[in-house]
Amino acid sequence: EVQLVESGGGLVQAGGSLRLSCAASGFTFDDYAIGWFRQAPVKEREGVSCIINSDGSTYYADSVKGRFTISSDHAKNTVYLQMNSLKPEDTAVYYCAADSNPRPLYSLSYDYWGQGTQVTVSS
């Protein structure tokens, strides 16, 4: 059974940092891409970042480039999203997702999803 479990969300002031974790199980980690997505109230789900575990390629939305960093620990089957210089507009529920061959930041191309973790950035 595929499982993706996010953790690390919380409340932080603008300018602060958080690190999200996505612990994966039930599939061959190295063969899958892991994406991070977010959804704020009354907004569509937005692709934030993706890492292709087979070759380490990374992708970022323009809105987070230079502030967020995605990384993968193959020994722990875990993907991290380091979020720095957080802004109030980063407030959302953050989800990780997995797929063997997705369009990196396109949510509909991912088959497996976690339950999400709330990130709230206060001004």
Image (tube, helix red, strand yellow):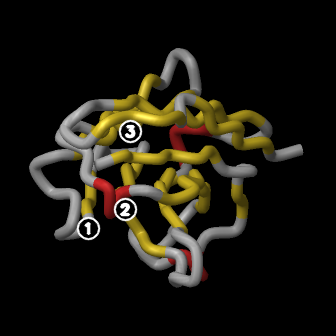
Identify which amino acid the numbered label 3 is placed on. Answer: Leu
Q: Are marks 2 and 1 in contact (CB under 8 Å)?
A: yes
Distance CA(mark 3)–CA(mark 2):
10 Å
Horizontal side, residue 42 vs residue 123: left or right: right
As helix, strand or loop, the secondary structure at mark 1 comes to loop
Residue 1: quadrant of the picture: top right
| CB within 8 Å, label 3 to label 1 | no
Q: Secondary structure at mark 3?
A: strand
The numbered mark at residue 61 is 1
Closer to the chain start, of discs 3 and 2, is 2
Instruction: Name the kind of residue labelled 2 in the image.
Output: Val
Task: Give the residue at mark 2.
Answer: 48
Q: Is residue 25 left or right of residue 119?
A: right
Q: CA distance from mark 3 to mark 1?
A: 13 Å
- Residue count near mark 1 (Cα–Cα under 10 Å), binned few <14, some 14–19, many ≥20: some
Task: Inspect this view and state whether residue 118 appears.
Answer: yes
Amino acid carrying label 1: it is Ala
Asked whether the beta carbons under mark 3 and mark 2 sit within 8 Å of each other, the answer is yes
Q: Position of residue 29 (x, y in %)?
A: 59, 38
In the depicted structure, whether residue 72 falls above or below residue 60: above
Q: Which of the two discs, 3 and 1, labels the residue nearer the N terminus? A: 1
